[in-house]
Image (tube, rainbow, N blue to C red):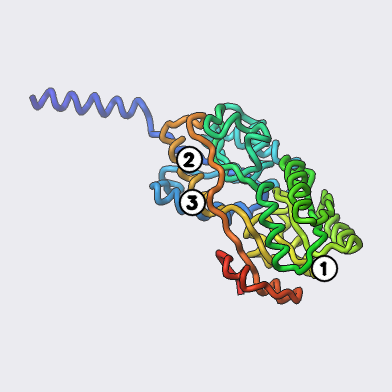
């Protein structure tokens, strides 16, 4: 029996050596800018650690940022495919579209994106098909709520500037839906295109000439990469502004109403976990956001001489004083 046991142990040892060391999965990230991406990734990494993934031990990370230069996203996505990522996490619509164009085999998890079905990123929410799953945003559908909030803080609001970037594939839908819902509020939308950083000053001069009373901002990696610049110019123009995510408010902006991205990125970590354990992306339904947050910056309000009504402050999930 002793001889037989030794032979068995020797055979198992030989088998393990023949198989070699277990491959450590490589998780890759594609986003607009380092500060924005790292802020989003904090809840993602927290959840990964809770799921027993530790960098350098049983997982490695690769990061790529296109720094608001949308034209670089496809090149960076292709680079992530070349370094043999096991999963790519995309942050934003442009990153998701670029990753989709770079690979049809590497699993892709969306941290958030524009309407993934309408943009043709996936076939269906319940049955996404292909190699892409995760979470999709409803940014355009939130326009009505944002206009309603602007009406509450700006008495007799009648004209709003809407800044948008042509590099975001979701822009056309966002602008059209915003203009449609604005008509029901009897609010006129002044649509202003912003292509480069140098266009910001001209955009706000145009808004001033049009006598707008408030500002809305379209989503996308371009604006996210230049948050502080947008916030500074809005404050200089004394314009009450509502933004597409809370990071603009953290950067000094007035107000944001958006999906709860902390929750979304925690869920994205759970998607990654399932894929690394063998589940196919096509078998994981894509989620639309169900949690939303209103964030208000009272310092920004004071800077432009605006008093936020208590009825709005009571509804805020977070108030920066």
Quarter of the image with the N terminus in it = top left
Left or right: 75 in relation to 165: left
Q: Position of residue 87 (x, y in %)?
A: 52, 37
Q: Secondary structure at mark 3?
A: helix
The front one of 117 and 24 is 117
Q: Position of residue 169 (x, y in %)?
A: 73, 40
User: Which numbered dot is residue 319?
Assistant: none
Mark toward the viewer: 2 or 3: 2
Left or right: 208 in relation to 113: right
Residue pictured at 56% horizontal, 27% vertical: 130
Mark toward the viewer: 2 or 1: 1
Q: Position of residue 293 (x, y in %)?
A: 57, 58
Label 2, label 1: how far apart the Cα atoms are: 42 Å
Q: Position of residue 77 (x, y in %)?
A: 65, 37
Q: Secondary structure at mark 2?
A: helix
Label 2, label 3: how far apart the Cα atoms are: 13 Å
Answer whether labels 3 and 1 touch (C-beta < 8 Å): no
Left or right: 143 in relation to 88: right
Which residue is denoted by mark 1 in the rendering? 237
Figure quadrant of residue 14: top left
Which residue is denoted by mark 3 in the rendering? 45
The answer to which of marks 2 and 1 sits earlier in the sequence is: 1
User: Which numbered dot is residue 271?
Assistant: 2
Mark toward the viewer: 3 or 1: 1
Q: Is residue 139 visible?
A: yes
Quarter of the image with the C terminus in it = bottom right
| Badge 1 density bin: few <14, some 14–19, many ≥20, Cα 10 Å | some
Label 3, label 1: how far apart the Cα atoms are: 38 Å
């Amino acid at each position: 029996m002793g001889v037989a046991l030794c032979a068995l142990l020797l055979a198992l040892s030989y088998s393990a050596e023949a198989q070699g060391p277990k491959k450590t999965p490589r998780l890759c990230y594609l986003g607009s800018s380092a500060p924005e991406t790292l802020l989003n990734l904090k809840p993602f990494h927290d959840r990964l650690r809770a799921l027993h993934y530790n960098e350098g031990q049983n997982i490695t990370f690769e990061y790529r940022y296109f720094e608001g230069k949308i034209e670089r996203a496809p090149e960076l996505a292709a680079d992530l495919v070349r370094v043999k990522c096991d999963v790519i996490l995309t942050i934003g619509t442009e990153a998701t579209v670029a990753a989709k164009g770079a690979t049809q085999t590497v699993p892709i998890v969306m941290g958030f994106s524009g309407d993934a079905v309408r943009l043709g990123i996936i076939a269906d929410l319940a049955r996404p098909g292909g190699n892409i799953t995760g979470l999709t945003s409803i940014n355009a559908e939130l326009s009505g709520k944002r206009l309603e909030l602007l009406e509450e803080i700006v008495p007799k609001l009648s004209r709003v500037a809407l800044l948008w970037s042509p590099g975001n594939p979701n822009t056309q839908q966002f602008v059209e839906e915003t203009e449609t819902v604005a008509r029901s509020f009897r609010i006129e939308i002044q649509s202003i295109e912003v292509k480069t950083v140098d266009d910001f000053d001209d955009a706000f001069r145009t808004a001033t000439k049009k006598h707008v009373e408030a500002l809305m901002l379209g989503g996308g990696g371009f604006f996210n990469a230049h948050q502080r610049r947008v916030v500074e110019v809005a404050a200089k123009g004394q314009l009450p502004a509502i933004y597409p995510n809370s990071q603009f408010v953290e950067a000094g902006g007035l107000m944001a109403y958006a999906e709860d991205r902390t929750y979304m990125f925690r869920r994205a970590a759970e998607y990654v976990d399932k894929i690394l354990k063998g589940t196919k992306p096509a078998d994981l339904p894509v989620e639309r956001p169900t949690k939303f947050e209103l964030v208000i910056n009272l310092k920004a309000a004071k800077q432009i001489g605006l008093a936020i009504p208590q009825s709005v402050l009571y509804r805020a999930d977070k108030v920066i004083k």
